[in-house]
Amino acid sequence: MIHFTLNGKNLQTNIDSNMPLLWLLRDEFKLTGTKFGCGKGLCGACTVLVNKKAIRSCITPIKQIENLQVTTIEAIDTLVIDDKPVGRKVQQSWQALNVPQCGYCQSGQIMSATALLITNSAPNSEEIKHSMSGNICRCGTYQRIRKAIQHSAS
Ligand code: FES
């Protein structure tokens, strides 16, 4: 039995502990905001936060989340760090700057952006570029993503 916290709720599962977290989220908990892209840890579409750090849920077996806190896009607006609603601010910036095109990669982008802003509340453009380099967008919305992160930090 694996115990963990998902979006603030204490949960447990006895599903095969080698199953990738992505499928636990999507198939068992119907949290379909987290997307499947490559399945190999290369595109970032499946990014979620585990103990406030960005991880690739497609290559993270459930056993690695034992007693940890998982946050998905569905609860990003509740994420408060040092009394600041970091997740909500990122979401609002994404909306204000109309970041998505097709939208498929954007939940992963938002999770990675939030993880960056948790550790660095005012990243410069190089830090943003470096930190977001593992999140691929086939529509090429990179400029708007970077602007939205700067907007969130301001
Ligand atoms: Fe996980 Fe691409 S689906 S990194």
Image (cartoon, grey):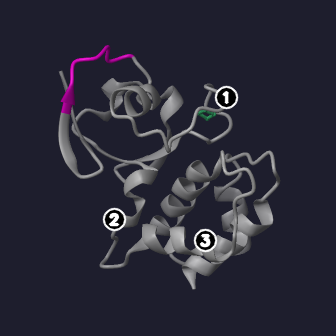
Q: Amino acid at mark 1?
A: Cys
Q: Secondary structure at mark 1?
A: loop
Provide the residue span drawn in magenta: 12-18
Residue 131: image quadrant is bottom right
Q: Tell me: 134 left or right of 90.
A: right
The label shown at residue 7 is none
Mark 3 and mark 1 lie on one chain; the one further toward the N terminus is: 1
**Where, quadrant-wise, is the C terminus in this rendering?**
bottom right
Q: Nearer the viewer, residue 72 or 62?
A: 72
Query: Viewer-nearest of labels 2 and 3?
Result: 3
Q: Amino acid at mark 3?
A: Gln
Residue 129 at what x, y percent from top left?
Answer: 72, 61
Q: Amino acid at mark 2?
A: Thr
Disc 2: which residue: 78
Residue 71 at what x, y percent from top left?
Answer: 37, 50
Query: Viewer-nearest of labels 3 and 1?
Result: 3
Residue 66 at what x, y percent from top left?
Answer: 25, 32
For label 1, being within 8 Å of ligand 1 is answered: yes
Spatial CA span between label 1 and label 2: 28 Å
Q: Secondary structure at mark 2?
A: helix
Spatial CA span between label 2 and label 3: 17 Å
**Label 2 environment density (alpha carbons within 10 Å; few <14, some 14–19, many ≥20):** some
Residue at position x 43%, y 32% from top? Answer: 26
Residue 50 at what x, y percent from top left?
Answer: 38, 46
Name the residue at the top extreme.
Answer: 16
Q: Secondary structure at mark 3?
A: helix
Disc 3: which residue: 95
Q: Tell me: 54 left or right of 130.
A: left
